[in-house]
Amino acid sequence: MSVETKQKFKGFTDVELKLIEKAREAGQLAESEVAASEFNASVSQNFVNKLIETGITRANLPKEYGGPQISLRGLGEIVRTLAYYNISAAWVGYFYPLHNSLPAHLPQEGRDEIINSNDLIVDVFAPVGQVIVVDGGIRLTGTYNYASGVNFAEWIGLGAFAQLPESDRPEFIMGFMRKDEVQVNENWNTFGLRGSGSNQVVATDVFIPRSRVLRLEVANDTRRPPAGSNYDPDYPYYHVPFFSAFYLGFPNMTLGGAKRLLDEYKKRTEARVRIHGENEKDSPRSQRILAHLMLEYKKANGLMEQYYDLLETYETEGPYDKGEFSSIRAEIIKICQDIATTIMVSLGGSSLAKNETIEVFVRDIIGVATHVTSLYEDALYTYGRNLYGYEGIGWG
């Protein structure tokens, strides 16, 4: 192992290192299937099976359920490793283990029911559903888009606003139901992130017991499980702001994709001879482009490290403004988006071939940048308001 590699993986546990290596294998499989996933608008069952077999989907389970309970940095590195080979696969490979953290914020009964089923979980946070509070729980109706990876999951959490009996106002919640209780419409047909299979879900008057209702605002504010539920102080999704920790995969996807594009740029310019006979690697133009983009990548990497530091010190040195978290994520993603488009344009027409590495990675990085948690102007607006002492928008 090189000095650079040892430094990169410094601090990771043996379990995390093994999962990162398994992520590399899964990513290579997804890369080999990219044409099919672009055509089918979904990663394959083979890829999902690989995630399950390697233990990646169980990486964020609380250790009381036999999970390795890896760190936030460990999950981020798994996502980045997958994204180096296929960003759509990293999107799904991020959400499946991540969503195993959701039941840790449910009452014990709901937590046990969902986790012990050993099934995959997906969600849609957008609070578009209509809720009626009834004895023992709620009834939810709504049409939700962007349920990433829903074709392979058995549980789905859907967002809404509801005034629960214990609350004095409507609050942001998520209700969990079996997939066979909703209708799935395969309508995912997009410019980027095609392999994520982010299809539509329709819930019609679905009853959700109170044990499967997650109070998102309470989880974000208390950073603890509900009263009466098992509490492991070492669980990485406690003691941190819920949403800011939950969203850490998005910048890691673009970092993994940008690194792949930088490696591709170097490889292709080393082999490229321009029409006037000059080898591209000898051109000051390409040398300056590569140097500039590498420095930009290092800046984005440094911001990601700061993001982890803010999460890890939130309760000891914070709290920090939610806008700071969102703006750091958005800045990383914007840097990686700029790296991607610069590489595409600099390599010329050869980078436009359909389903070829450059074209797919550029589209997918732009796709990540369009996610509601990545929107650059929204993030900076929120952080700017925070800096002047005002409340921002969004959840961090």
Image (cartoon, rainbow, N blue to C red):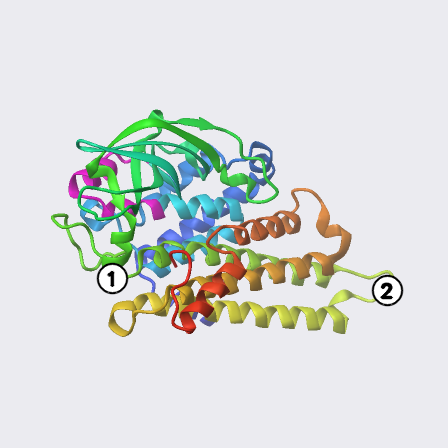
Q: Residue furthest right?
A: 276
Using the image, tell me which numbered label, if any, was put on residue 278.
none
Query: Disc 2 and disc 1: Cα gap in Å?
Result: 59 Å
Q: Position of residue 92 (x, y in %)?
A: 44, 43
Corner quadrant of residue 223: bottom left
338 relative to 168, above or below:
below
Do callouts 2 and 1 mark residues in contact (Cβ within 8 Å)?
Answer: no
Look at the image and give the residue range highlighted in magenta: 98-119
Label 2 element class: loop
Q: Position of residue 230 (x, y in %)?
A: 14, 49
Residue at image x 18%, y 59%? 233
Residue at image x 14%, y 48%? 229
Using the image, tell me which numbered label, if any, was put on residue 277.
2
Residue at image x 54%, y 51%? 370
Residue 8 visible within the image: no
Residue 247 visible within the image: yes
Residue at image x 17%, y 45%? 166
Q: Is residue 358 left or right of residue 83?
A: right
In which quadrant of the rendered image does the N terminus lie? bottom left
| Front residue of this view, candidates 241 and 89 | 241
Q: Is residue 18 magenta?
A: no
Q: Which residue is mark 1?
A: 239
67 relative to 119, above or below:
below
